[in-house]
């Protein structure tokens, strides 16, 4: 069967090449007046294949030439839009029409406004081998999604988007020049991620799926959700101490990985450090998927067997009225104290209010299912569009992955240690394991806390208790993102 499929594919490829050769023979030669040969047509087709681009990538001078040609075409097209009086106007127009940073530097040199001598190379790989490496990474993400079931809803489209982005000459994620459309992944990113719409719609769906009952039944567990945000700020400080590798905005975007909240990480990175979005998103979702592997050793290290066996009393019943009032109250507090967090908190609470009001079942069902599923597909592909070789294969990416892991571990530890501290002053003991659920990987971290607790006492059910700090962690990471946006966004 495999032989038959392979044979069919080869025949189809040959037919396509013959058709293309016929097309060239019929149209190209008369138009140019040059001597046309079938071998020349096939040679041109060979040079346009992805295999040729992988085996013989463009040299740095050829890449610079392409960038300059695109920049000049873009800037010249801008002349027809309005009069360009100065060199600065010319450069601004080139930027507006999608010229690259390197091309702009060359334009400045040509226009007598030199700032640097030569081009500053920030990429380790930009073509050929780099693209192949990124395609392998994309396949690795798909493997983790399918074979290991690590966050498959995001890692599968992210991995596929990474492959599409690194196909040579296809331009699937590139901005278009004047009169030409951009790649479709470029629109996914510009419309959904750069605008912040996709993360907000994800928050709407998550809110519609969230039950605040455990948090309302035991309000002090909200403190554990706050304690688990420790990783965000420790990672931020760590990024600033890495020898000037990251700016303050970059450090804030990296630190939010410690909240284990993918949409929040994407939202903040798109605002503060869009050039790091791909690495930050992959790190955030990868560590969320690795919760069952990362968190248990930290839980066992920071707690004793006696602490892990603490039994918590059954939660009280929470009325429907309490569940309706809660999202409105949180929204009002957010408006008064931290307006910058309102986009995330507002959509989260809207989704929850639709669920708890029980009067818009159709809207709630759409937010929980159809809407969030559609947005998840496009969000994953948009993130994958930022995994181009030149953007991802850098020293900064390694720093992001290391700092993201550190942030996640510190967030887990922060929740556990705060629970232990609360036990010193509280009459009613809290099982410290539920503090680890303060990171907002809902509901995976709550399940992990329950599993580790049952290792100490098989009859101890911690799942509903852990859901309190778990949903509080979602609010906490959104608040932390609002704080960072307010402090670093200017």
Image: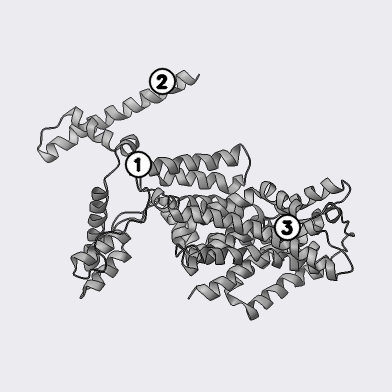
For the view shown, which residue lies furthest in the bottom direction? 336
Which mark is first along the chain, 3 or 2? 2
The quarter of the picture where residue 349 lies is: bottom right
Residue 215 can be seen in this image? no
Pinpoint residue 414: horizontal percent, then vertical percent.
70, 63
Q: Are marks 2 and 1 in contact (CB under 8 Å)?
A: no
- Crowding at label 1, few (<14), some or many (≥20) Cα neighbours within 10 Å? many
Which mark is first along the chain, 1 or 2? 2
Say which mark, if any, is on residue 414: none
Pinpoint residue 282: horizontal percent, then vertical percent.
53, 51
Q: Secondary structure at mark 1?
A: loop
Q: Secondary structure at mark 3?
A: helix
Provide the residue designation for mark 3.
437
125 or 225: nearer the viewer? 125
As drawn, is 165 to the left or to the right of 62? right
Residue positioned 40% across, 51% down in the render: 173
As drawn, is 74 to the left or to the right of 235? left
For the image shown, how many numbered marks are present on the structure?
3
Provide the residue designation for mark 2.
7
């Amino acid at each position: 069967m495999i032989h038959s499929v392979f044979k069919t594919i080869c025949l189809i490829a040959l037919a396509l090449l013959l058709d293309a050769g016929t097309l060239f023979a019929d149209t190209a030669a008369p138009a140019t007046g040059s001597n046309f040969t079938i071998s020349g047509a096939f040679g041109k087709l060979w040079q346009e294949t992805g295999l040729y681009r992988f085996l013989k990538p463009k040299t740095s001078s050829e890449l610079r030439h392409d960038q300059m040609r695109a920049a000049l075409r873009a800037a010249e097209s801008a002349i027809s839009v309005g009069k360009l009086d100065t060199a600065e106007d010319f450069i601004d127009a080139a930027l507006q029409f999608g010229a690259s940073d390197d091309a702009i530097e060359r334009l400045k040199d040509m226009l007598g406004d030199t700032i640097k001598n030569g081009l500053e190379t920030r990429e380790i790989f930009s073509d050929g081998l780099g693209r192949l490496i990124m395609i392998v990474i994309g396949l690795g993400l798909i493997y983790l999604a399918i074979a290991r079931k690590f966050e498959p809803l995001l890692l599968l489209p992210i991995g596929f988007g990474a492959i599409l982005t690194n196909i040579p000459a296809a331009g699937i994620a590139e901005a278009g020049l004047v009169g030409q459309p951009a790649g479709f992944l470029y629109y996914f990113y510009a419309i959904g991620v750069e605008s912040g719409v996709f993360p907000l719609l994800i928050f709407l769906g998550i809110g519609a799926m969230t039950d605040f009952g455990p948090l309302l039944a035991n309000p002090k567990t909200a403190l554990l959700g706050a304690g688990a945000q420790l990783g965000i700020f420790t990672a931020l400080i760590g990024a600033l101490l890495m020898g000037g590798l990251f700016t303050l905005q970059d450090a804030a975007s990296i630190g939010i990985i410690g909240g284990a909240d993918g949409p929040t990480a994407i939202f903040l990175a798109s605002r503060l450090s869009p050039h790091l979005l791909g690495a930050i998103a992959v790190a955030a979702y990868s560590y969320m998927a690795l919760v069952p592997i990362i968190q248990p050793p930290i839980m066992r290290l920071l707690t004793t067997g006696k602490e892990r066996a603490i039994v918590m009393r059954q939660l009280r019943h929470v009325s429907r009225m309490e569940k309706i009032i809660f999202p409105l109250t949180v929204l009002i507090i957010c408006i008064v104290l931290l307006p910058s967090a309102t986009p995330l908190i507002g959509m989260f609470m809207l989704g929850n209010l639709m669920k708890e009001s029980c009067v818009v079942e159709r809207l709630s069902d759409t937010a929980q299912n159809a809407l969030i599923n559609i947005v998840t597909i496009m969000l994953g592909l948009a993130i994958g569009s930022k995994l181009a070789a030149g953007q991802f294969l850098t020293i900064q990416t390694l720093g992001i992955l290391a700092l993201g892991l550190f942030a996640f571990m510190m967030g887990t530890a922060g929740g556990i240690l705060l629970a232990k501290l609360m036990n010193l002053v509280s009459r009613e003991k809290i099982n410290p394991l539920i503090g680890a659920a303060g990171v907002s990987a809902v509901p995976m971290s709550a399940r992990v806390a329950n599993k580790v607790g049952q290792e100490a006492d098989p009859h101890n059910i911690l799942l509903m208790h852990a859901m309190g700090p778990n949903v509080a962690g979602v609010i906490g990471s959104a608040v932390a993102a609002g704080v960072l946006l307010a402090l670093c966004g200017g």
